Image: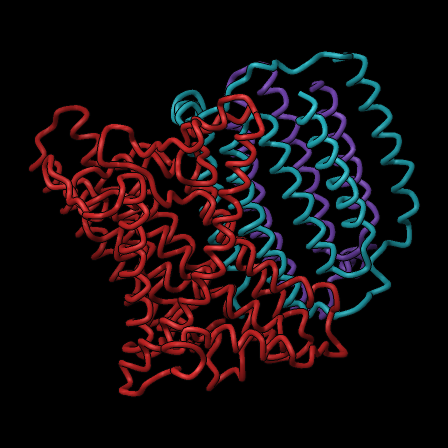
Amino acid sequence: MIISLDPLLTEDFTATVIAIVLLKVLVIFVVGLVATMLMVWFERKTIAGMQNRVGPNKAGPFGLLQTLADGIKLFFKEDLLPVKADKFVFRFAPYLSFVPAFLAFAVIPVGGDFRGDTGGIVTWFGHATRVQLADPPVGFLFALAISSIAVYGIMLAGWSSGSKYPLLGSVRASAQMISYEAALALSFGAVVLVAGTMSTSGIVNVQETLGDWHVVATGFVPFVIFLMAATAELNRPPFDLVEAEQELVGGFNTEYSSIRFALFFLAEFMNTITMSAVIVTLFFGGPQPIRIGDTALDIPLIPNDLEGTVWLLGKVLVFLYVYVWLRGTLPRLRYDQLMNLGWKLLIPTSLGWFMLLAAQNVGQDRGWNTGVVTAVSIAVILICVMIVQAALKVSAANREREGSVF
Amino acid sequence: MLLNQFLLLGAVLFCIGVYGVIARKNAVMVLMSIELILNSVNLNLLAFAMRSGTADGHTFALYIIAVAAAEVGVGLALVLLIYRNKRNIALEDLSEMKG
Amino acid sequence: MVAQNIFFAIFAVIMVVGALRVVTSNNVVHAALWLVTVLAGAAGQYILLSAEFVAVTQVLVYIGAVMVLFLFGTMLTRARLGEETDLNNKTWILGIPVALLLFGTMSYALIDSFGDEKLPEDATVVSTQVISDQIFGPYLIPFWALSFVLLAATIGAIVLARKD
């Protein structure tokens, strides 16, 4: 009854079909874990380069096995359980943080042959399938929903630790994450407006040429908003106040030690990889090659079926580097600055841009003059911006006069 | 799948929710029991929507989810206010207008 | 169709056990977590009912926002770790016959009217486009009313929670 757009699951459930699905699950899980390990190394080496030092270079060639060494060390540390902790929730919270990253990775297309007309469908063992684990028609909404479950891991971790600092850190973290979810969803709405579908394979299929990539087709603004909101969702710098060692001792993972702490740490990096893959799929065409007009850039020496994966890997690496770059260069935002940015800048901007795109869409459907539509919508947006600025000025004046009322 | 299995599941959740509203003293617990009731109604609506093949039930289920979110927002603001004034949220103590 | 019945049974057991633990738990945060379990089971049931969009919206809105709000409200009103033994009314025992009577009446009415009616087996997943046609078509005015309700709830919650 659940009809997905994946041609593999509309056939009968033979043993080969089940084996292909299990193979996909295994590959995603293993690749996710290995990629997390390599991402930690990549970040430490790049940050070291930016800070003019060497970084890990002892464990394995170029320090590649450093994460493994850290993991083994953490595994052998003593596993503390605070006396006032809520035992079941304390043990359960790291998994609530760790599992959503893998689940969200299930709907992301990691390859496929987009060079011809096949639309990304490859043939494995005689069965036509897409190179992703699942492809429901509401694919990306599913990814958003799963990433909103990640809030629970942090919130419950802080509460169940039974002490002040973790509770404060976790309340701040969850407030930050749910504030930026709205901006995330609104800029995702702009992409859905342009693409016409919410399924991941559909969104990737629409972005054929370089001018069709959603970063260009939706204007540049939803991409910027999505990038900032995603950085805040991941608790990455410059929005990493919740893990600020200088202020909260350790934030929500103060009382966590050994393998549980490792799980939180790995969860953050796995979430980073997943969110980079989501950004690439939404805005940069995922496994699509760079195609201008009709000519697509061809990577020599790689068979057609694997080219999609190589393109996706390259694009995801660019975004992982961007995240590390943001960590190395930007100072941390204060908490009230963070909340101001999320509520007062990102949400109105993404909403206004969504309205702009909707007006353009309706105008094209009904054959209105594009210039007139653009001029009228810009005028309306300017009026709204002035109203919002006036409101902010009035509220700031009120707050100064009365003192803070919260 | 029978239609009745979904409707009976909805009925069970509804009755558990009603018990929760009657028996619980803490305001937040009563709100949670109301959430149970709303979810049982959603289940009912979607089962009938599948039976009739239209999407009306889905639309109403979405509206109910939105209304539940609004209600929880206001309800928790009220709970916060009660907590500020009385330092506990037992509904039995809110009887100042009695008599 | 056997697989769907098995999944229905699994989700139904999880939901009923979760709901019972919500109304009998001694700790507010534990009750909230059991409610999250019930909501997740409900989302699974919606997928069995070909309602994919509503299922994902349930996870996104109910589990991702409403329950987080619940947990915030509980933590800000100082949820104490460990058991609180006074979460039930003095007259809680009256709730059991009321609930049982209600369930008896409802189940009799349901079994009597619908009997062994089966759901259509060839139902397709209701796509988002059909739902949006319904929302912006016949049910547009409830949609506007709902947006006013949400606006009123937002303003009301802010005004209620201010410190003056």
* Residue at x 47%, y 42% (from the top left corner): A142
Q: Residue furthest front?
A: A301
**Chain B in the picture: what colour?**
purple
Residue A194 at what x, y percent from top left? Answer: 26, 37
Say which chain is cyan.
C
Colour theme: by chain
* Residue at x 79%, y 69% (from the top left corner): C82
Residue B51 at what x, y percent from top left? Answer: 61, 16
Residue A25 at what x, y percent from top left? Answer: 52, 45
Residue A146 falls left or right of residue A353: right
Front-lying residue, C115 or A52 = A52
Residue A125 falls left or right of residue A54: right
* Residue at x 47%, y 65% (from the top left corner): A268
Residue C156 at what x, y percent from top left? Answer: 51, 53
Front-lying residue, C164 or A302 = A302
Task: Decide if residue A332 is in sight here.
Answer: yes
Q: Which quadrant is the N terminus of chain A positioned in?
A: top right
Front-lying residue, B9 or C121 = C121
* Residue at x 40%, y 45% (from the top left corner): A108
Say which chain is red.
A
Residue A347 falls left or right of residue B78: left
Front-lying residue, A128 or B20 = A128
Choose top left, top right, bottom left or bottom right for residue A201: top left
A367 versus A374 height, above or below: above
